[in-house]
Image (cartoon, rainbow, N blue to C red):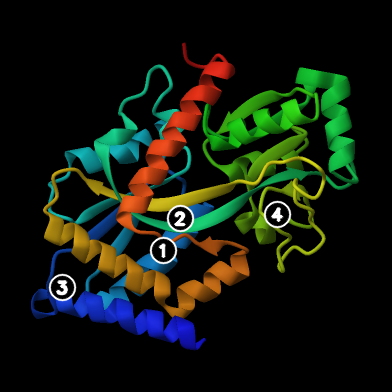
Amino acid sequence: MLYRTRRHILALGLLAGLSAPSWGQQQPIMRIVHGSGAGAPQDVMLRILADEISKASGRSVIVEPKPGASGQLAMSFLKQAPADGLTMLADGTGITSILQLPGRLHEWTDFEPLYRVQLDPFALYALPQKFKDFGAFAEEMRVKKDHVRIGGYAIGGPFQMVMMQLSRRVDGDFSWIPYDSGGKAIAAVIGEQIEGAVSNVSVAGTFTPRTKILAQTGEARLAQLPDVPTLKELGIDIVKYHWRGLFIKKGTPEALIERNYAMIKAGVASARFQKYLKESGTIEGTISRTAMADMLTEQARNDTQLLKQLKMIP
């Protein structure tokens, strides 16, 4: 608790030092746009974060879902906005794979990395009455191959790619059914339209016990889900987190970028946001802007290799 308090004070100090004289209730509204639907894990996280940023800065910050084209409609909104620091884009792991696929509207390098906020393990959801554990699901993929229907967000995004890696490790196969949110994919599992769904552990509270998480991709078991094994402990060497973060328009003045970084840092450090992370089984993702840019470059390189192996790009 003392550590968090000190971090919060440090973030607020940086915030005040950058812009205290000019910030107030009359300042223009700031927007965070994202490509998920209302109520999706990203949307829930961003609304809590926006509230805490507002409290720390005195600025009004609103969250606007703009679903469509695997997040690319929200990206278009940012590109059309002025470079004044008032509009930010929230996206995640899939930005470097989706924006390498044919037909993309943007390049991942079109956006300035700003802040990595959250790490959320991937999770495989299924009906408990159909699959007692991950071993039973893996056997289904080995026997029925592509007749096993698995759904998740987008085509060519991290959820599909994690499932492709996983199926190869168990010598199985599946058919991917894309949805515009992980929640809709899990709802399809409940309706017995598909056999499994890949989403995140942060939505577990909404969909269990109607569905069961067979495994998750974190480094260790979660206190919130103590009965859910990791792939690592099941003998499958896959440890991955779906990160969510914020981007800003390229060409935004450095002083405004630094101001926004400090605002987000103060929101992330707040007691309420830290409580949300703990209760949702997710992890704070704060790193420097330079580290985030380096992470994206390395991730894009790895995505290129994997997408070529999967014959999704030439």
- Left or right placement of residue 47 versus residue 13 in this view: right
Mark 3 or 2, nearer chain start: 3
Q: Where 265 falls versus 152 (above or below)?
A: below
SS label for mark 3: helix
Q: Amino acid at mark 1?
A: Arg
Q: Amino acid at mark 2?
A: Asp
- Contact? badges 3 and 1 (CB < 8 Å): no
Q: Which residue is mark 2?
A: 43
SS label for mark 1: helix
- Contact? badges 1 and 2 (CB < 8 Å): yes
Q: Which residue is mark 3?
A: 18
**Does the image show residue 65?**
no
Q: Amino acid at mark 3?
A: Leu
Q: Which residue is mark 4?
A: 207
Mark 1 or 4, nearer chain start: 1
Picture coordinates of residue 301 (x, y %)?
44, 30
